[in-house]
Amino acid sequence: MTPFRITFEESTQRHCLQTIPDYHVLLNGKRIERLYWNIRGYRGAVPTPDGGLFDPGEISLTKFKTIARSLEREAKQQKTAA
């Protein structure tokens, strides 16, 4: 079974007046979703161990990274329990 690893990569594509970068959400190196800046935070979704997507709403990139780490721990626990 492949490891469940979520990473964030800064997007190189920006609009001419965009000052805050967008990010790609990668699962084991494959692009899954895009995070974009809204009025109060980033919008987007992170993949879950069961194959779905979790959309936490407008939150900071740090919170997205925290959620990603907890989902990785959950996937590891599911793998060891099986």
Image (tube, helix red, strand yellow):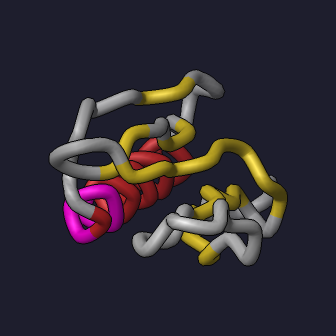
Give x and y (percent) for residue 8.
56, 70
Give x and y (percent) for residue 43.
38, 40
Q: Main secondary structure of the magenta part?
A: helix
Q: Is residue 77 above or below residue 50?
A: below
Residue located 68% across and 60% down the image: 26
Left or right position of 28 against 22: right
Q: Is residue 9 above or below residue 22?
A: below
Viewer-proximal residue among 59 and 6? 59
Splitting the image into 4 quarters, where does residue 66 fall?
bottom left
**Where are the magenta residues, as a range?**
62-66
Viewer-proximal residue among 73 and 13? 13
Specify the farthest residue to the front. 17
Residue located 50% across and 71% down the image: 21
Viewer-proximal residue among 39 and 65? 39
Residue located 78% across and 54% down the image: 31
Quadrant housing the C terminus: top right
Viewer-proximal residue among 71 and 9? 9
Q: Does the stretch in magenta take in 81?
A: no
Left or right position of 73 against 36: left
Splitting the image into 4 quarters, where does residue 6 fall?
bottom right
Give x and y (percent) for residue 39.
23, 43
Residue located 27% across and 33% down the image: 56
Q: Is residue 14 above or below residue 10?
A: above
The number of callouts visible is 0
